[in-house]
Image: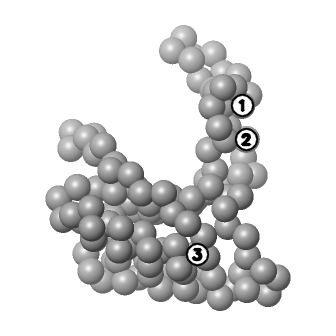
Amino acid sequence: MAKYLISFPSAAMVVPDGELGTVGRDAHAVIDEAKAAGVYVFGGGIDESVPPVLVSADGAVAMGGYPWAPTLDGGFTVLELPSRNEAVAWAARIAKACRCDQELRVFGFDPQS
């Protein structure tokens, strides 16, 4: 089985006033379903209140991430599933709960990590 990364950038999640609690409950319900199905690996979101730092091979630390790369933010879920079709189905469930499109990618899991 492959691991799939399902994610969205923060800007994609536009929730009308007063609906954030409902979106949170719906999203957690889908994650609970994934856990019950035994396909949940991990998930979470980038803490955007903590700025990134770029650490070089010599240990030097600079504020910010790669200057040429897009900002990395938003939410992430990794599920282990038997097929891409099942991954698409789970991504659709997460998209419905979060009220925003989800990107789906095969996660290059290293079993020695």
The answer for how far apart the CA atoms under marks 2 and 1 are is 7 Å
Which residue in the structure is indicated by mark 2? 51
Residue 35, image x and y in percent? 34, 77
- Identify the mark nearer the N-term, 3 or 1: 1
Disc 1 crowd rating (10 Å Cα; few below 14, some 14-19, many 20+) is few
Residue 22: mark in rendering = none
89 in relation to 59, above or below: below
Quarter of the picture holding the N terminus: bottom left
For the C terminus, which image quadrant?
A: top left
Three-letter amino acid code of the residue under disc 1: Gly
- For disc 3, the neighbor class at 10 Å (few under 14, some 14 to 19, many from 20) is many
Sequence-first tag of 2 and 1:
2
Above or below for 45 versus 97: above
Residue that numbered label 3 is attached to: 98
Indicate the amino acid at tag 3.
Cys
Q: Secondary structure at mark 1?
A: loop
Q: CA distance from mark 3 to mark 2?
A: 24 Å
Mark 3 and mark 1: Cα distance apart in space: 28 Å
Residue 78, can we see it? yes
Pointer 2 and pointer 1: residues touching (CB < 8 Å)?
yes
Q: Residue at x 28, y 45 (%)?
A: 109
Q: Looking at the image, is mark 3 or mark 2 earlier in the sequence? A: 2
Residue 89 or 24: which is nearer the viewer?
Answer: 89
Q: Which residue is mark 1?
A: 64
Quarter of the view holding residue 52: top right
Q: Residue 91 falls in which quadrant of the image?
A: bottom left
